[in-house]
Amino acid sequence: MNTWIAIGATALGCYVVKLVGLLVPAGALERPLVKRLAALLPVALLAALTAQQTFADGRALVLDARAAGLAAAAVALVLRAPFLIVVATAVVVTAGVRAVGG
Amino acid sequence: MDKRDGGGRPDSAVVRDALGVGVAVGLSGFAFGVTSAGSGLTLLQTCALSLLVFTGASQFALVGALAAGGNPLTAAAGAFFLGVRNAFYGLRLSQLLALPRAVRPFAAQWVIDETTAVALAQPTRRGARIGFAVTGLSLYVLWNLTTLLGALGAEAIGDTDAWGLDAAGPAVFLALLAPMLTTAVERTVAGVAVVLGLGLLPVLPAGVPVLVAALAAPAVLWAEGRRKGAGHEDGPGEDR
């Protein structure tokens, strides 16, 4: 049930912000500070989420195979690999390190 | 409408670009389906997210937060804040596409990173409309189809962690984040957010550290504004 509440709230919230952008008059959100903040908010959220999902095990911080997978994904990004290759690299390297590490 | 309005690219070239983006990104719904099912969501819940939320980063964030045991509304808040950027895409698109008011509630679901990028790249309104519609349709259909296949696949293979599939979520975030780190300001925001997100993890309830980490954005903007203000007094000629 809790999961459905989260899904409903997310679906509603995400749809409303999409619609608001199409409906509000141009200029309402065009203040430079608001635009800067809107561009920086995803940077902060994505950075925090990447770090947490790489190093968190519940509420503890751990260094495991995922760190190796993400490091490999970072190398793939530097080499300008396509999106799917970056994700696949992380998955394969993580699985490989786990298989070797037992 | 006129078949080709002045200086536009042929319709077929726009369709080709749009399909390229729609197919490439649409396939990554597979990673979402696997991650979501691996996080303990049911097949129906996983498919409902792709059908109704349809903005990838928010979907990954939500299932990650739920898997970590977060409160449902805290988890939804993190996903929602990631989706706020779509409002700003909508602003750009509403001027560019000039959609009738009655069409906007239907077009809204497709207002995401990829459709905006393709539409903004077209020099004419006709091209932008075709780019938006073809990217939106191909991405929506494929994303939902691959979500279903990914969730079914995850249920079939059982322990998704053994296959390294728990690394797919953070890798998606990293791939979305990397092109945004264009200047020192973005990199500072990202660094502060990582420190807050990891540092607060052991002390705050699940899902809350990410929301606190989001404060890195206004904090760094504020610090930048102060520095600029001080710099302005010293040398009025500087512009960055």
Image (cartoon, coloured by chain):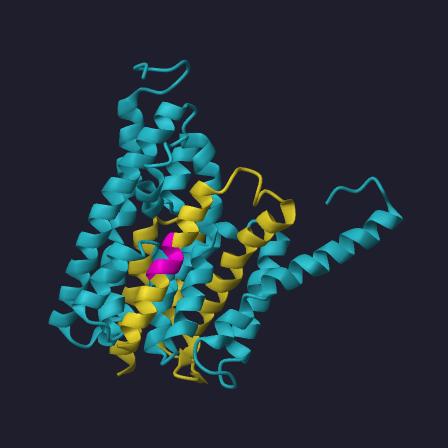
Chain colours: A yellow, B cyan
Residue depicted at 39% across the width and 34% down the height: B119
Residue B38: in magenta span: no
Is A57 located above or below residue B136 in the figure? below
Residue B171 as seen in the image, left or right of residue A91: right
Nearest the camera: B211 or B33?
A: B211
- Residue A36 in the image: state x and y as whole percent: 60, 50
Residue B62 spot, x, y in % from top left: 36, 68
Q: Of helix, strand and loop, which mostly describes the magenta segment?
A: helix
Residue B68 position by quadrant: bottom left
Position of A7 with respect to B174 (left or right) is: left
Which quadrant of the view contains residue B9?
top left
Question: Going by the image, does B91 lie left or right of B65?
Answer: right
Magenta span: A11-15
Vertical relation: A23 (above or below) A69? above
Residue B235 falls left or right of residue A45: right
Vertically, is B231 above or below A56? above
Q: Which residue is nearer to you in this view: B5 or B142?
A: B5
Quarter of the picture containing the N terminus of chain B is: top left
Is residue A79 shown to the viewer in this render? no
Identify which residue, B26 or A55, lies in the foreground.
B26
Residue at the extreme right: B234
* Residue B207 position by quadrant: bottom left
Residue at screen point 54% across, 51% down? A39
User: Where B232 falls versus A50 (above or below)?
Assistant: above
